[in-house]
Image (cartoon, rainbow, N blue to C red):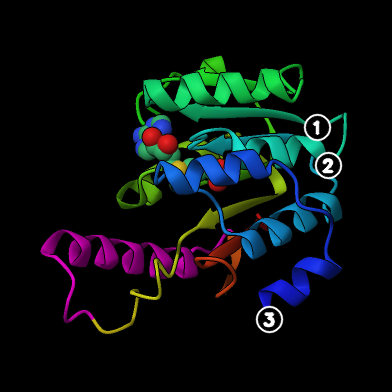
């Protein structure tokens, strides 16, 4: 099915990055998750975007490619990823639209960022999702959107946990707790989707 949809959707971009990610086991957003993320950006006309977790810059490049007015701040702590991402932003000549912020997102001083984002994409350490959400939504405008990736984590969340390690079990529990916490928030309306590795789309309603 995905091959059929691929042909109908927009042409594939940045395939060299996809190959690099596969060969080097770098986790990047799944194709259908990316289609939805880009569609949301278009529909809500998001211009100021914050990404937590750049890796090699694949999703940031895609988001920037939507429109020349889009500005992206993307945070990454891993030095090898930072090096690759900078190389890729230069290669595709999108570094005027993408600002890579080096460091741990949990320690970063918020004063170094814009004061209002239209959309925040959370795609870093899954065990810390709630902390990222609480910290960075202070910079989200009312009506803004938070997209969280991997909320069903390889179908393991709410699935069968027989053959997985204790660490993975603990991670799965944390993602499940995050999903229920998101669902309970009064100031956000969240839709949970099994697209890609699971996406939560949260709209700030208050
Ligand atoms: C799933 S990858 C990001 C993929 C990227 N968004 C994409 O789809 O192309 C997660 C990245 O988040 C980074 N990361 C994890 N925890 C972080 C933190 N606390 N602060 C900054 N970066 C973090 C990891 O080093 C990793 O490169």
Q: Is residue 44 left or right of residue 181?
A: right
Above/below status of 143 relative to 33: above
Which residue has dot 3 on it?
1
Residue 48 in the image: x percent, y percent? 74, 33
**Could you tell me if the residues under marks 2 and 3 are in contact, i.e. CB atoms within 8 Å?**
no
Q: Closer to the camera: disc 2 or disc 3?
A: 3
User: At numbered mark 3, what does the secondary structure look like: helix, strand or loop?
Assistant: loop
Which residue has dot 2 on it?
66
* 162 vs 193, nearest the viewer: 162
User: At numbered mark 2, what does the secondary structure look like: helix, strand or loop?
Assistant: loop
User: At numbered mark 1, what does the secondary structure look like: helix, strand or loop?
Assistant: loop
**Gap in angstroms between the C-alphas marked 2 and 3:** 25 Å
**Sequence-first disc among 3 and 1:** 3
**Could you tell me if the residues under marks 1 and 2 are in contact, i.e. CB atoms within 8 Å?**
yes
Q: Closer to the camera: disc 3 or disc 1?
A: 3
Can I make out residue 47 in this image?
no
Residue 42 in the image: x percent, y percent? 84, 51
The N terminus - image quarter: bottom right
* 196 vs 127, nearest the viewer: 196
Q: What stretch is highlighted in magenta?
A: 161-187
* 64 vs 183, nearest the viewer: 64
**Could you tell me if the residues under marks 3 and 1 are in contact, i.e. CB atoms within 8 Å?**
no
Q: In this view, does 132 lie to the left or right of 148?
A: left
Quadrant of ligand 1: it is top left
Which residue has dot 1 on it?
70
Residue 121 in the image: x percent, y percent? 58, 45
Q: Is residue 143 left or right of residue 180?
A: right
**Sequence-first disc among 2 and 3:** 3
């Amino acid at each position: 099915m995905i091959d059929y949809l691929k042909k109908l959707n927009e042409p594939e971009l940045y395939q060299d990055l996809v190959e690099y990610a596969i060969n080097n086991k770098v986790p990047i957003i799944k194709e259908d998750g990316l289609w939805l993320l880009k569609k949301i950006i278009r529909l809500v006309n998001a211009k100021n975007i914050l990404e937590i977790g750049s890796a090699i810059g694949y999703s940031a490049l895609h988001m920037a490619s939507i429109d020349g007015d889009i500005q992206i701040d993307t945070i990454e702590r891993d030095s090898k990823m930072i090096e690759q991402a900078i190389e890729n932003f230069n290669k595709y000549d999108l570094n005027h639209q993408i600002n890579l912020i080096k460091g741990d997102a949990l320690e970063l001083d918020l004063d170094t960022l814009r004061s209002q984002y239209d959309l925040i994409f959370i795609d870093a350490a899954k065990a810390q999702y709630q902390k990222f959400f609480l910290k960075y939504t202070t910079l989200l405008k009312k009506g803004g959107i938070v997209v969280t990736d991997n909320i069903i984590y390889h179908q393991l969340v709410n699935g069968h946990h027989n053959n997985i390690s204790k660490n993975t079990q603990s991670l799965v529990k944390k993602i499940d707790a995050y999903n229920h916490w998101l669902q309970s928030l009064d100031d956000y309306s969240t839709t949970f989707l099994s697209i890609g590795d699971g996406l939560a789309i949260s709209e700030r309603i208050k």
